[in-house]
Image (tube, grey):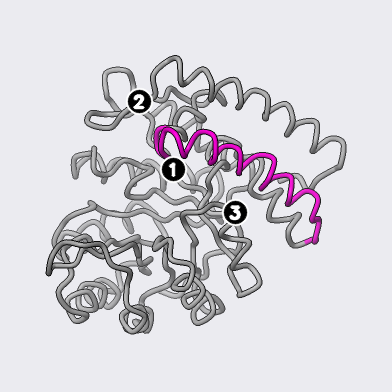
């Protein structure tokens, strides 16, 4: 049951849809080939980028199995993380863990999506998953919905401690977007478990790198998959020029110019299409960027693609 998720970038799976709303498995296979060819060592089929809320339970099982089998066929050493339905009872998560194990996944990502009333409630959910022995558990930690009023609230630190002490918990996706909580989790658990920082991009990751952060969830690497491993290698080599170029020259403009205006999921999928992987179509009620706005993203992506090619050639940046 012990597993160590390798340090470095975590490549999230974006589920492609046809114009009629069906999962486009040929496009997904091609996309998985693309990211594994860039030496992705951790591939994560996850709640929101992978569109679990728009999928039936049967489709989630099929998607997870497809991702696990395809990635393992390409690189048996790659770590595959998959999850279950965004909202379900604990026993249903256990069934999805078993499906995921049988499909060849290495780690199961579990949300607590119910309203929060007590630490025991959250602890027992993860205890039952972790003690099942089916798969190591990744705690998908994001702000809780307070059962007394409905406001969002960060996880209390003592609740983090309770859950992270469970022996079957191997990792945490830290998605609180609370810098103080992120620092607490990285400093206390980053040396023994994988803490995958999410939200805030590489700028956030760099803020916590000196505190022990070693994993982050891809942002612009979703549609520029050649960048994440090169960035990680440059960071370890203390190539500050290359690191700064990625953050200030690529990531910051994308977030400031497009994510701030259109939202992460809408802008990200536009980037995926512009980079040539698959169309940006979503399932209702999700929103696909309209043509005039998409054109702005496409123009930027094509320019940056050429900059990436030239930069890596000129400076012999660490290629994946």
The boundaries of the magenta stretch are 237-266
- Badge 3, how many Cα within 10 Å: few under 14, some, many 20+? many
Q: Secondary structure at mark 2?
A: loop
Helix, strand or loop for the magenta stretch, by majority: helix
Label 1: which residue? 13
Regarding residue 81, the answer to whether it shows in the image is: yes
Q: How far apart are the two marked residues, 2 and 1, measured between alpha carbons?
A: 18 Å
Residue 44, position as x, y percentages in the image? 44, 51
Question: How crowded is the residue under tag 1: few (<14 C-alpha within 10 Å), some, or many (20+)?
Answer: many
Where residue 318 sits: x, y (%)?
78, 48
What is the number of the mark on residue 202?
3
Residue in front for this viewpoint, 59 or 317: 317
Identify the secondary structure beneath mark 3: helix
Which badge, 3 or 2, comes first in the chain's sequence?
A: 3
Name the quadrant containing residue 256. top right
Please tell me which residue is depicted at 52% across the width and 79% down the height of the picture. Answer: 192
- In the image, residue 268 lies at what x, y percent? 47, 35
Q: Which residue does the numbered mark 2 point to in the structure image?
A: 288
Outermost residue to the top = 292
Question: Gap in Å between the C-alphas at discs 3 and 1?
Answer: 18 Å
Where 170 sits versus 9, above or below? below
Q: Is residue 251 magenta?
A: yes
Q: Which of marks 1 and 3 precedes in the sequence?
A: 1
Contact flag, marks 3 and 2 (Cβ < 8 Å): no
Q: For this view, does 179 lie left or right of residue 37?
A: left
Kindly check if marks 2 and 1 are in contact, taking CB atoms under 8 A apart as contact.
Answer: no
Of the two numbered discs 2 and 1 on the same chain, state the one appearing first in sequence.
1
Q: Quadrant of residue 305?
A: top right
């Amino acid at each position: 049951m012990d597993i160590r998720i390798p340090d470095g970038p975590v490549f999230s799976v974006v589920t492609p849809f046809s114009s009629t709303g069906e999962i486009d498995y040929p496009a997904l296979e091609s996309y998985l080939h693309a990211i594994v060819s860039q030496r992705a060592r951790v591939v994560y089929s996850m709640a929101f980028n992978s569109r679990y809320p728009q999928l039936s339970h049967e489709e989630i099982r099929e998607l997870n199995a497809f991702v696990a089998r395809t990635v393992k066929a390409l690189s048996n050493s790659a770590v595959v993380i998959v999850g279950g339905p965004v909202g379900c009872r604990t026993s249903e998560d256990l069934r999805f863990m078993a499906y995921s194990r049988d499909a060849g996944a290495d780690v199961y990502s579990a949300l607590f999506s119910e309203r929060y009333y007590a630490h025991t409630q959250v602890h027992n959910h993860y205890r039952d998953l972790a003690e099942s022995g089916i798969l190591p558990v990744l705690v998908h930690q994001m702000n809780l919905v307070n059962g007394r009023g409905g406001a969002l609230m960060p996880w209390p630190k003592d609740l983090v401690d309770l859950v992270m002490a469970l022996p079957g918990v191997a990792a945490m996706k830290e998605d609180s977007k609370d810098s103080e909580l992120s620092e607490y989790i990285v400093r206390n658990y980053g040396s023994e478990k994988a803490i995958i920082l999410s939200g805030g991009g590489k700028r956030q990751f760099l803020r916590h790198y000196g505190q022990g952060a070693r994993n982050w969830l891809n942002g612009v690497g979703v549609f520029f998959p050649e960048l994440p491993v090169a960035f990680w290698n440059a960071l370890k080599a203390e190539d500050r020029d290359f690191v700064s170029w990625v953050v200030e020259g690529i990531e910051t403009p994308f977030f400031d110019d497009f994510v701030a205006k259109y939202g992460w999921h809408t802008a990200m999928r536009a980037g995926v299409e512009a980079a040539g992987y698959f169309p940006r179509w979503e399932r209702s009620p999700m929103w696909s960027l309209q043509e005039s706005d998409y054109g702005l993203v496409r123009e930027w992506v094509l320019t940056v693609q050429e900059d990436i090619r030239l930069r890596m050639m000129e400076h012999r940046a660490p290629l994946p």
